[in-house]
Amino acid sequence: MKITDVEAIIVRQPEISLIGDGTQDSVIILVHTDEGITGIAEVDSAPFLVKAAIEMPDSHSACRGLKNILLGENPLDIERLWNKMYHYSYYQGRGGVVMHAISGIDMALWDIMGKALHRPVSQLIGGSCREKIPAYISILMPETEEEVKKLVDYHMVQGYSGIKFGWGSLGQDPKRDIALIRAAREALGSEKKLMIDIAMGWDDYKIALNTCHAFEEYNVFWVEEPFCVERKADFSKLRSETALNITAGEELCHVDEFDTYIREGCVDILQPDMSRCGGLTAARKIRDLACRSGIPIIPHNFKSGLLMSATLQFIAALPNALYLEYCGQETVLSRQLIAEPIQVKDGWVSIPDSPGFGVELNWETVEKYRVS
């Protein structure tokens, strides 16, 4: 089997709001082979930059387009191809968007292998540990306490294990943050988990610490990305000075970064994104690091059902999986990019057991929103 083409298809809603909702556009990766098997994946990144990293012409041996690196290769040589893409993308930068592009291609290669061997990807990356996983709903933080309560009531009837509010106005005004979290807990009740994603919004450490102490009163399960990810010392210090779980991982782009976060005691829970951390090839190594250190992994997953399908295969092979992050943004791409949407039933999501990732693209949606 040989790779014949690598496509990056951008899909985008007609109107884009700058509110932190990554489900308004996306980039789909397709890896085609001479045996008619096509691997599909989705990348949660800057779509036009991912496309450029894949399709760019070669400049020289240390600066090559990812597509050109792969043409004619055997798609089943996944780790060798990962290392080859990494090696020949030195000039573009091995973090950020180039690693995101590598991640998407890597996931598509795993989808090819699963389809070729007629097995779900979970069986190829360690073996299936479960058939379903409890989900928590993940949504953007609205502006008012009334809106918070309405969203809790609207979503929690599905039986989710908890709810995460993130981005929006969080991190700008501690008093407002506390009022919004109080409203969320009042609407949620005492049993369900409440998570908060500050989206790297805190600059002042003392304000961050005092706000976390206030959140403790409302039994917040975790505070996600309180600072920019470079502030590892502040992550570690905050973790030691609050009873809350501190989490991060979606912005990390290399196994070594996750290793550093573990060794320096930055987080209680790791949240790698399959489309940013290096794909499933890297995620397996992150899993092994976390398991040896006793750190739980709850992957970041805030996109469409296509990225969710890859995340679910990783979760199926994760020994200590706790929850699936289920994106609650009801955009056309988040809900209609795959042919059969992944559903929540009584708070649980079943993990597809068909070959590969177990999903297919909804080509009607792709063509309608495709950026030419």
Image (cartoon, rainbow, N blue to C red):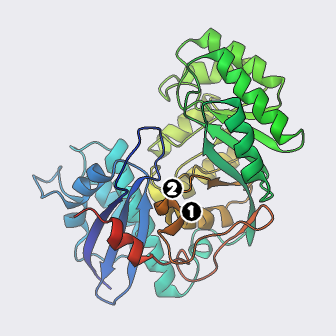
**Regarding mark 1 in the picture, which secondary structure is present there?**
helix
45 relative to 226 in the view: left or right: left
Disc 1 to disc 2, how far (Cα)? 7 Å
Quarter of the figure with residue 206: top right
Residue annotated with mark 1: 308
Residue annotated with mark 2: 303
Q: Judge by depth and name the residue closer to the eye, 73 or 139.
A: 139
47 relative to 326 in the view: left or right: left
Q: Judge by depth and name the residue closer to the eye, 55 or 211.
A: 211
Q: Nearer the viewer, mark 1 or mark 2?
A: 2
Q: Judge by depth and name the residue closer to the eye, 54 or 80.
A: 54
Query: In the rendered structure, which amino acid carries the disc numbered 1?
Result: Met
Q: Relative to 148, say whether 120 is above or below.
A: below
Which quarter shows the N terminus?
bottom left
Which quarter shows the C terminus?
bottom left
Residue 84 visible (yes or no) = yes
Query: In the rendered structure, which amino acid carries the disc numbered 2?
Result: Lys
Q: Relative to 202, say whether 167 is above or below.
A: below
At 72% from the left and 43% from the top, the residue drawn is 150
* Disc 1 and disc 2 in contact, CB within 8 angstroms: yes
The 10 Å Cα crowd at callout 1, few under 14, some 14 to 19, many 20 or more, is: many
> Where residue 356 sits in the image (x, y, percent)?
52, 78
